[in-house]
Amino acid sequence: MKAQAVAFDQPCHSAYEKFIEITNHLQGEVLSAGTHSDVEAYLEEDGRELLRLLLQEHLTNRGSGRVGEAVCGADGVVRPPKRDHLERSYQSVFGRVQVERTGYGQRGVTSLFPLDAQLNLPAQGYSHRLQQRVARQAAKESFEEVIKDIEAETGVHIGKRQVEAIVVTAAHDFLL
């Protein structure tokens, strides 16, 4: 008996559909006749996409981080909500995800995004976990090898300049 996707309102609907797709594919003729390596390669790639979808849906379900009519920054300046649902994306170890957030600001001062702080979003556009992997590997091998290994492990491509910047930041944090 084949599993069938049921359309109903659930928090992680896209991830659930991907899970059903994966289980159906595993029961299909192509992988049933495949080798262990074929199945493992499929699960590595599509399983990573399932995890990315779960992370994305978690971020979406958290909301935009709107915390009220205004926020006061550490500088003492009160900022009203200026823009709702500004998107910011970053690369996680599972792939690119987006965060919709509310920005608070006014002319002449830097805008604040409470959700960025709540989530501890990375400044560089790469998740802290991905940056940790890059820094650990850069201590052992060349930047070119780091790029290849990170892409092989996570499916995420990071440019050489970005790898260098991540390593410099990690070294600076380590020295402090």
Image (cartoon, rainbow, N blue to C red):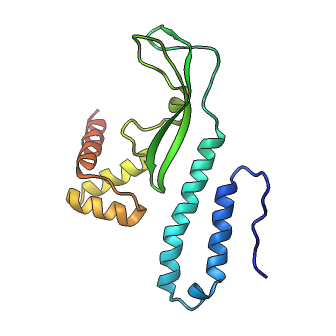
Q: Position of residue 144 (x, y in %)?
A: 22, 60
Q: Residue at x 47, y 76 (%)?
A: 41
Q: Residue at x 79, y 82 (%)?
A: 1
Q: Does residue 74 appear left or right of residue 148 in this picture?
A: right
Label total for image? 0
Position of residue 142 measured from the top left corner of the image (x, y, whole percent): 20, 59
Residue in front for this viewpoint, 75 or 3: 3
Against 84, residue 21 (above or below) is: below
For residue 66, above or below residue 55: above
Up the image or down, 80 lies above or below 152; here it is above
Which is nearer the eye, 131 or 22? 22
Q: Tell me what residue is drawn at x 27 percent, y 59 percent.
A: 146
For the residue pair 127 and 140, the one nearer the viewer reads as 127
| Left or right side of 140 for 6 | right
Q: Whole-percent x and y of residue 33? A: 57, 92
Residue that protrudes farthest toward the left in the picture: 142
Residue 60 image point, x, y percent:
62, 42
Q: Quadrant of the C terminus?
A: top left
Relative to residue 133, is residue 68 drawn left or right?
right
